[in-house]
Amino acid sequence: MSEAKFRTLARKVRNQIEVGHYKEGSKLPTHRALAKEYGTTPMTAAKAYQLLAEQGHIESHVGRGSFVKKDASLKHVIRSRHDQNEWNFSILQPCLGEHLDSLNTQLKDCFNNINDPALFGYIEETGERAHKDAGKTWMSHYGLDIDEPEQVLLTNGAQHALSTLIQCYSEPGDRIAVEALTYPGILSIIQSLGRQSIEIVMDDKGMCPKALEKACLEQAPAIVVVIPSHQNPTTITMPKTRRKALAKVINKEQLWLIEDDLYAFLNEEKIEPICNLSKDRGFYVSSLSKAISPGIRCGYIKTPPSQTERLASFIRTSIWLSPPLMFEFASRLIQSTKAFEYASLQKRIAESRQKIAADVLNEFTLTSQASSYHIWLTLPDDLQARDFVTVAKDKGLIISSGQFFSHTQGETCVRLSLMAIADENRFVEGLNALKSLLQDLVRI
């Protein structure tokens, strides 16, 4: 069977999905019917469907057939975040209402007092040293070892950092090891860049080192991506022992590590990053998006000393440099310690909301940490996440399906963000509405 044939067929089916010929959630033709329609073999049709499933366009179920995958909730979440008739339990962001006035004042003060004309022009070395030094201060505060500010590179947020690293340190077709359930933005990057994700088994301490080692022997991934603190979506925070064990595998197998540690500020105490234990192989990613505001598109990458110039050159090639004016604002927040005050406030809000959620949803199975922005809820009586999310949406409850975080898992789980609803009374109303819906569905 020609590889080109099934890829061509997959592209044709995907085009039909995109133009609406095959609707969201609709059942696709059987392998035999598709093969007849396009003048090929059922085996080629099967391979095409397998590829589309791996790419996240369709879902296949034994005995039921293949279906167009329903649109991930992210677009709807962003569109509906200001809809007063809905409760947004999906998007992960700070509870902005608590510090928005202060942040606005800080922003105005910053831009009213910029007197450095260099910030309005091109800057060499992918950014001002002072801005890199602020990034060093931010990441060091939460436990990262950084020798020199030059090891800090500036990006347009963490998503840009992740995309840049995967593109720079792997080739099309390479395999990227990820946690079995992980942030969908990572999966999207891997897919869009023509790489393949390998889902590594997790336990209650995070990614399993033995499973990663086995994947290295059998599938030779180029990169491993890990979210070690308040993992999205499971909320797991890796203990020191697990981080050391993963670092040992990474160093032994000579993998590139991307440590996506945006939620380190929520940890009860500083936990040594994996990159401290794998300094020659690890890239540490942080930003201000989760601690302060997603609108501050300021991301930081701490690089291994040997890789600073290579990655800096790659960033220059793609965007030249990240906006100096916004990094000036971020740097002033960090150096004045306001950034840390905002982060601590968000942590306290998260702790309070975790207690409220645990009280309201006490009869259901929850995985959570005391200060996480979210909880991972296992649906009762084998309710399917896909169906539950649809029913919840009709009730004004916007929730992330567990299948959003994996190509193969999460069918009976959902992730609930506790921070996107700014008003606490409204937040409690939404939790009670969610509780009532779950109880009603269990009784059916």
Image (tube, grey):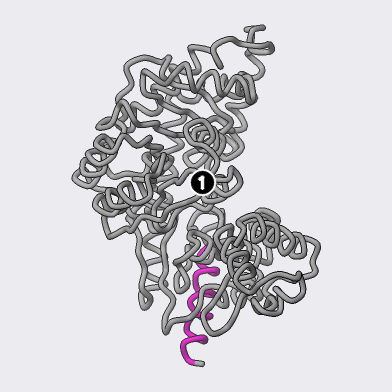
Q: Assess whether residue 272 is covered by the magenta stretch.
A: no
Which residue occupies the foreground of this view, 11 or 283? 11
The rendered magenta stretch, by its main secondary structure, is classed as: helix
**Residue visible at 67% across and 59% down?**
5
Residue found at the very far left of the displayed protein: 241
Identify the image quadrant of residue 157.
top right
Q: Is residue 105 left or right of residue 187?
A: right
Q: Assess whether residue 435 is covered by the magenta stretch.
A: yes
**Residue visible at 75% across and 71% down?**
39
Which residue occupies the foreground of this view, 388 or 305? 305
**Residue visible at 47% across and 72% down?**
411
- The boundaries of the magenta stretch are 425-443
Image quadrant in which the N terminus is located: bottom right
The spot of residue 390 in percent (x, y) is 62, 74
Q: How many marks?
A: 1
Q: Amino acid at mark 1?
A: Pro
Which residue occupies the foreground of this view, 430 or 277? 277
- In the rendered image, the vertical position of residue 289 relative to residue 410, given as above or below: above
Q: Is residue 391 left or right of residue 275?
A: right
- Which element carries disc 1, helix, strand or loop? loop
- In the rendered image, the vertical position of residue 411 relative to residue 221, given as above or below: below
- In the rendered image, the vertical position of residue 2 relative to residue 432, given as above or below: above
Q: Is residue 53 left or right of residue 117?
A: left
Q: Which residue is mark 1?
A: 94
Which residue occupies the foreground of this view, 362 or 221? 221
Q: Is residue 310 left or right of residue 85?
A: left
The spot of residue 173 in percent (x, y) is 52, 44
**Residue visible at 45% across and 74% down?**
412
Q: Residues within 10 Å of mark 1 (few under 14, many from 20)?
A: many
The spot of residue 236 in percent (x, y) is 33, 54
